[in-house]
Image (cartoon, rainbow, N blue to C red):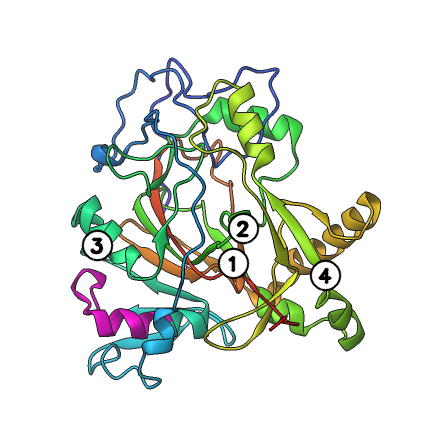
Amino acid sequence: MAPHVAPPSPALTSTSSSCSDDEEVYDINVPIKAGPKPVRKPSTAYPNYLPTWDPNFFPPLPPFNFTDPGLRADPLKRSLLLPGVITTPISPKMGTEVTGLQLSSLSSQQRDELALLVSERKVVVFRDQDFADIGPAQQQQFANHFGKPNYQPVTGSIPGFPGFHIIYRDGNRREIERYFEQKSSASIWHHDVSYERQPPGYVVLCMLQCPEVGGDTVVASMTEAYKRLSPGFRAMLDTLVATHSSERISTFARSHGGLCRKDPVTSYHPLVRVHPVTGEKSLFVNDEWITGIQGWKKDETDWLIKYLMDHISKGHDYQIRLQWRPRTVVIFDNRSTCHTATVDYDGVYEKERHMFRLAAMAEKPIPVHRED
């Protein structure tokens, strides 16, 4: 797209920051409670998608059987990739932009083939989608084709649809300034809710409103990151099991006056997982949710996680940078990618960045060495 610079929005007379100046910060992209009401009325065209914190509580999701829809798909994707549908690679090894399709009108067979395309290309981008306008019931129904809905424990959703994870930032300049007083970067490389027993396989992101420039999402191929390691190092990683937990974010929310809808979840996942559709091996490691490695001491764990995250964050030859526009929908494979938001619009744009996420829970991560 051709970027252009617009003047900053009018300043607020009260900030939407949810924290006082001396409080710890967690993640600038994840508000845990509603802040003071700003004088400037939100300008979003989707006010029904502003976050709310309904006092609902969700028990742990029990184990469930899952068959990946990509396994049902025609390998040639003849129902999805009809004449007039154009696929353009974003990079040679990952990412595809698709034009000529509206997600809202896909049949069940086409959705299966879309799952296969996402499994193969890891990130698939659709622009100018009416998906943003079909309403939460149909949006959730679309996501349910790819797995069970995930209910995020601390962030805002919309009334009656707890599977929506709403990301809404209104410029929040003071909050961003305070965040960067404590941290040098807003990057938190993560898989979405990897602490769940059966974490999401497919994740749908829909941008409703955003600054003209900035706020991109960077995605790394964990498959390629794994391949770049030496055979001996990979063999060692293949045997490891990591502890993933939501304890930190749940504790943070409760101690800072936020709502926590679920008790903390702790799960044990292989550090290298096998994709059920492609059979590829991928690193399953991130900055946010891992609290330990079974059989390893804390300093050993800290060293390995730092080494792997440095390896991933520096691997620009297996990353893509997604630029957002309103009504863009991105579907990514949460098993074979890791991603981070960027906060680079502070002091330039005080404009809404408003999107929603629907995460589809899938299989329990498959280890390299399975016990049959």
Q: Position of residue 40 (x, y in %)?
A: 29, 20
CA separation in Å, label 1 and label 2: 16 Å
Q: Are marks 4 and 2 in contact (CB under 8 Å)?
A: no
CA separation in Å, label 3 and label 2: 26 Å
Please give the name of the residue rendered at 53% of the width and 19% of the height, measured from the top-left corner: 256
Q: Which residues are magenta?
A: 100-115
Which comes sooner in the sequence, label 3 or label 2? Answer: 3
Please give the name of the residue rendered at 66% of the width and 60% of the height, measured from the top-left corner: 271
Q: Amino acid at mark 2?
A: Ser
CA separation in Å, label 4 and label 2: 16 Å
The secondary structure that dominates the magenta segment is helix
Which comes sooner in the sequence, label 4 or label 1? Answer: 1
Q: Is residue 226 rendered to the left or right of residue 4? A: right
As drawn, the label of residue 219 is: 1
Front-most of 192 and 146? Answer: 146
Q: Are marks 3 and 1 in contact (CB under 8 Å)?
A: no
Q: Amino acid at mark 1?
A: Val
Q: Is residue 292 rendered to the left or right of residue 350? A: right
Q: Are marks 3 and 2 in contact (CB under 8 Å)?
A: no
Residue at the spot of label 4: 240
Please give the name of the residue rendered at 62% of the width and 15% of the height, measured from the top-left corner: 22
Q: Residues within 10 Å of mark 3 (few under 14, many from 20)?
A: many
Q: Amino acid at mark 4?
A: Leu
Relative height, residue 74 to residue 197 (above, below): below
Q: Residues within 10 Å of mark 2 (few under 14, many from 20)?
A: many
Res 307 quadrant in image: bottom right
Question: Label 3's element?
Answer: helix
Q: Is residue 232 magenta?
A: no
Q: Quadrant of the C terminus?
A: bottom right
Which comes sooner in the sequence, label 4 or label 2? Answer: 2
Residue at the spot of label 2: 194
